[in-house]
Image: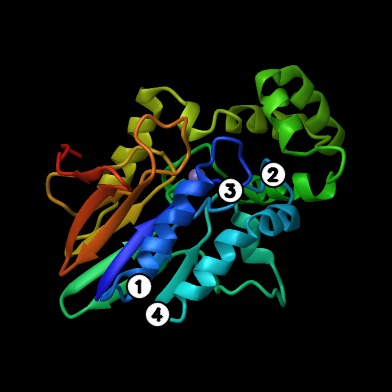
């Protein structure tokens, strides 16, 4: 079993490096021996773009992933920015959308989750609501508007207040707008620490969400990083073989540093 994992492409977001990700998929298609490919959440960004629009725009990516499925198993685990995929009924997307995933080979166990589970700011009903906001408000509220609005919070608050009447929700949404890649390092550390303390003996835990790729010293906790150019280190992916994780920058070699976590 050779597993390749990538997360947080945020397709539909202006800083998503879709071009690089397509090249990565092309390369993966030519590789022999990879048995499983895991898309670990926030693949499309439904907080910034309506669900159907973002998938349509990402058709070039979907075609490649569909081609990969002829060579290997493909798994799609939902993140907070694409949480809504779990609600899609009778869809025609070439995936089974999962909340989390476990893979086992002999004595090697791998547990995959996006990582919002370790983020106290993320709550499922809100993740779903934020995904749906874009779909429900489609037309008047596209990705360009999102970029402007995240710079000018007052506009977004106005927009959200027209949808979420409850003040409590609005306040939580305000906190949620500080998405992981924009948060300060100390709050990121909390998410990562929680992930590390949640690793179970005898398994490798693989998560994304924070856009900070790393492998810990014990090599049992791995963060897949992201494919957004506003993350200092991006276009990263993880390779798992015989219980050992390896972290790579696409087109940039392997990250061999191990951090204490
Ligand atoms: Mn996320």
Mark 3 residue element = loop
* Left or right of 225, for residue 156: right
- Residue 205 rendering spot, x and y as whole percentages: 28, 57
Distance of label 3 from label 1 (alpha carbons): 21 Å
Residue 216 sits in which quadrant? top left
Confirm whether residue 237 shows in the render. yes
Q: Are marks 1 and 4 in contact (CB under 8 Å)?
A: no
* Left or right of 153, for residue 33: left
Q: Which class describes the residues within 10 Å of circle 4: few (<14), some (14-19), or many (20+)?
A: some
Mark 2 residue element = helix
Q: Nearer the viewer, residue 122 or 20?
A: 20
Mark 1 residue element = strand
Mark 2 against mark 4, which lies toward the viewer?
4
Q: Earlier in the sequence, mark 4 or mark 3?
A: 3
Q: Nearer the viewer, residue 239 or 203?
A: 239
Question: Which label is found at residue 156?
Answer: none
Q: Nearer the viewer, residue 112 or 27?
A: 27
Which residue corresponds to mark 2?
130
Q: Earlier in the sequence, mark 1 or mark 4?
A: 1
Q: Which class describes the residues within 10 Å of circle 3: few (<14), some (14-19), or many (20+)?
A: many
Q: Earlier in the sequence, mark 2 or mark 4?
A: 4
Which residue corresponds to mark 4?
71
Looking at the image, is 90 positioned above or below residue 209? below
């Amino acid at each position: 079993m050779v597993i390749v994992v990538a997360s947080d492409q945020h397709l539909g977001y202006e800083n998503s490096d879709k071009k690089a990700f397509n090249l990565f998929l092309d390369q993966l298609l030519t590789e022999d021996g990879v048995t499983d490919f895991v898309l670990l959440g926030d693949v499309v960004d439904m907080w910034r773009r309506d669900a159907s629009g973002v998938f349509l725009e990402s058709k070039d990516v979907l075609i490649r992933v569909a081609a990969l499925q002829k060579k290997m198993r493909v798994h799609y685990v939902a993140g907070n920015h694409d949480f809504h995929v779990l609600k899609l009924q009778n869809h025609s997307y070439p995936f089974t959308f999962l909340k989390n995933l476990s893979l086992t080979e002999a004595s090697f166990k791998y547990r995959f989750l996006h990582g919002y589970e370790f983020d106290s700011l993320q709550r499922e009903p809100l993740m779903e609501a934020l995904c749906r906001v874009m779909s429900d408000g489609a037309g008047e509220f596209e990705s360009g508007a999102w970029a402007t609005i995240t710079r000018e919070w007052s506009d977004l608050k106005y927009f959200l207040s027209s949808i979420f009447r409850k003040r409590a929700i609005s306040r939580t949404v305000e906190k949620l707008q500080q998405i992981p890649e924009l948060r300060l390092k100390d709050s990121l550390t909390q998410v990562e620490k929680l992930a590390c303390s949640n690793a179970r003996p005898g398994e490798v835990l693989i998560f994304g969400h924070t856009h900070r790729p790393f492998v810990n010293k014990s090599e049992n906790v791995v963060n897949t990083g992201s494919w957004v150019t506003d993350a200092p280190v991006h276009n990263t992916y993880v390779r798992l073989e015989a219980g050992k994780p390896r972290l790579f920058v696409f087109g940039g070699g392997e990250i061999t540093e191990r951090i204490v976590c």
